[in-house]
Image (cartoon, rainbow, N blue to C red):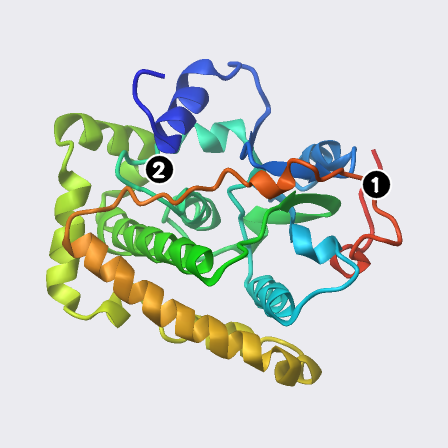
Amino acid sequence: MPERGKNNSWNLFVHSYSAANAACLCFMDADIVIHGPETLWRMYCALELTPNASVAVDHPLKDIALNGRNSLSERISLATSGMTRTAMAQLSGQLYFIRTPIARRIHLPKDLAACEDGFIKALVCTDFLTNRLCPDRVTLVDGAAHVFQSYRTFRDVLRNQKRQMIGQTIVHILIDKYLKNLPVSQRLNMANAIRDRDSCDRDWLKRLIAQHLREIRYFWRLFPNLLRFRYDRWRALPLGKRISYLPSALTGYAVTLLASHMAFRSLKQGSINYWPDTRSRGLKEFVPGEFSNASPERFFTTAIQP
């Protein structure tokens, strides 16, 4: 592509290169391993069989989840993932199917940076900001999964969380402070509204970010619930798991605070295109297999039969 960037590629694929008669579109990152030969088929079938759903997602698995034994740091990492799954309508940008008519009503802003999946989820689950949140718009497919490389060092974890904080801040600014105030006609035709804004004023989102930072003043106010979301996920766990997951919750809280401070400083300096190396070299030797006794069966229940 003449212009680099995941958002630019997404927009070109959805609006220019994908088949005009496609019922749905599949998006996946290059640095993942599909786990199970029928994962993509099951996701497609789930979307076809769930009329209210606009997006189908699978189970993202850290590579360390398939190990027989894990170190203390790895157990903390897996527990963090377990708490994340307690949130409703999780959409991982690493792999998902979306109905084509819905995708073509979306245009990713040029400066969205990270968390394009959060932006898409917010639009899809609110019928483009015209209704209250409806988690049923995203369907989680049993028996479908992909494996991604977990972050091995504290530095990598921190850099990834910094990227997440930047992305969540920009999504908050777009969804909660700007787009929801557009006329209904523009919200229902979101792709044209954002495309026109990007074409007429390339720095419009940068100015919104700068204004937001002037208003909040402190890093812990980058987006609503920044100080509580990890606590809320921990509280959503069954009572018996709260004690065992407490070290992970406390560690995650500390990392969130530090990463938020780093994100705040980067945004103040005008840096939004922060993207650490995610080439996942550790997955080169990973061999995908069928769901078996060696797989983490706790992640799966019944599966849709093709």
Q: Name the disc covering residue 56, or none.
A: none
Residue under label 1: 290
Q: Quadrant of residue 88?
A: bottom right
Give the structural element (helix, strand or loop) at label 2: helix
Q: Position of 8 compared to 65: left or right?
A: left
Residue 121: % across, % down: 46, 47
Q: Which residue is at 16% across, 48% downward?
A: 270
Dot 1 or dot 2, earlier in sequence: 2
Is residue 198 among what the camera can see? yes
Instruction: State the image coordinates of residue 14 (x, y, percent, origin top left).
Output: 44, 24
Answer with left or right where residue 100 lies relative to residue 201. Answer: right
For marks 1 and 2, give the CA distance: 41 Å
Is 123 left, or right, of 149 in this rendering?
left
Looking at the picture, which amino acid does disc 2 mark?
Leu
From the viewer's perspective, tell me whether residue 27 is left or right of residue 115.
Answer: right
Question: In the drawing, what numbered circle is on residue 188?
Answer: 2
What residue is rendered at 73% in x and 34% in y? Answer: 45
- Contact, mark 1 vs mark 2 (Cβ under 8 Å): no
220 and 248: which one is in front? 248
Q: Quadrant of the C terminus?
A: top right
